[in-house]
Image: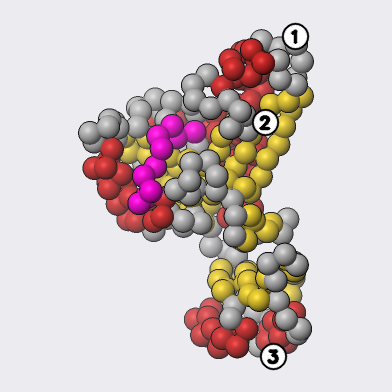
Amino acid sequence: MNPTYILTLSCPDRLGLVHAVSGFLLERGGNIEEAAQYNDIDTGLFFMRVQFACAAVTQEVLNEQIGLLAQPFAMQWRLHARAQPMRTVIMVSKEGHCLNDLLFRWKSGLLPLDIRAIVSNHREFYQLAASYNVPFHHFAVSAASKAQVETKQYEIIQSEDAELVVLARYMQVLSDDLCHKLSARAINIHHSFLPSFKGAKPYLQAHDRGVKLIGATAHYVTAELDEGPIIEQDVARVDHSKSVEDLATLGRDTESQVLARAVKWHSEHRVLINGHKTVIFK
């Protein structure tokens, strides 16, 4: 089997970009298996994702030569080996539905991840982590210990060389410093009642207002709380007959599915950040 790679790039739009990339790969014996591109007329930017097989040139050489190709086009680019699962750390608090769903999908071969550790501010899920043979790290968080705990958490992320951090209902606000350190590689999930139903008990607030739709949003983590680039959203219809518990149950299912799709697309290198938005090549 020929090694398969995924090239993602963005740059100012101009004539000949697709030709330049496809010609570059042809000259090196690369066989394009999947390709997608998008021109954002509002920003003047071009985005592209190419999956290709190539045995004639090593990944190290490809990296060097793509760097030369990129210079005259002012490309921002990354090359990934498709066979390499994405090293991931999951953070969780007391609600485990998203964590459980991600672990099951991972072990079932549905997510190209290498889950290296689970980090939590509570002990609830150490047995679940052990059942999947994933190291579990517990750090109790208080106002006084928050900075120290974040330092330890980041040390774990760095020691595991994590390319992705998933906040699977981790109910602590990350500091601006940690948000910057995890820029474009941390994904959060929340109920999409925000900003209408902020704070505690969002499903109770939604029930009191008689909502007809509930949902969830997966987005990249930024220092601006819950305002990072959105990756995926979904909704479910409800009516007057649904209790608060019904809304919470349906909401948990929606959150799990939305987060799983966002993690899958990110780990397959299908998401490119476009300012405050995302370009997703599904």
Residue topped by disc 3: 27
Q: Nearer the viewer, residue 213 or 130?
A: 213
Q: Nearer the viewer, residue 237 or 275?
A: 275
Determine the main secondary structure of the stretch shown in magenta. Answer: loop
Given contact means CB atoms under 8 Å apart, are the residues at marks 1 and 3 in contact?
no
Name the residue located 66 percent from the left edge and 10 percent from the top edge: 243
Q: Can you tell which of label 3 and label 2 is closer to the viewer?
A: 2
Q: Is residue 30 visible?
A: yes
Say few, some or many: other residues with alpha carbon within 10 Å of mark 1 (under 14 / 14 to 19 / 20 or more).
few
From the image, which quarter does the N terminus lie in? bottom right
Image position, residue 188 (x, y; %): 52, 42
Q: Secondary structure at mark 3?
A: helix
Name the residue located 53 percent from the left edge and 27 percent from the top edge: 198
- Three-letter residue code for mark 1: Ser
Residue 215: mark: 2
| Figure colour scheme | secondary structure
- Three-letter residue code for mark 3: Glu
Q: Residue 251 sits in which quadrant? A: top right
C-alpha gap between disc 2 and disc 1:
17 Å
Image position, residue 240 (x, y; %): 75, 11
Stretch of the chain drawn in magenta: 169-178
Name the residue located 61 percent from the left edge and 28 percent from the top edge: 196
Q: Can you tell which of label 1 and label 3 is closer to the viewer?
A: 1
Horizontally, is 96 left or right of 18 in the view? left
C-alpha gap between disc 1 and disc 3:
63 Å
Residue topped by disc 1: 241
- Three-letter residue code for mark 2: Gly
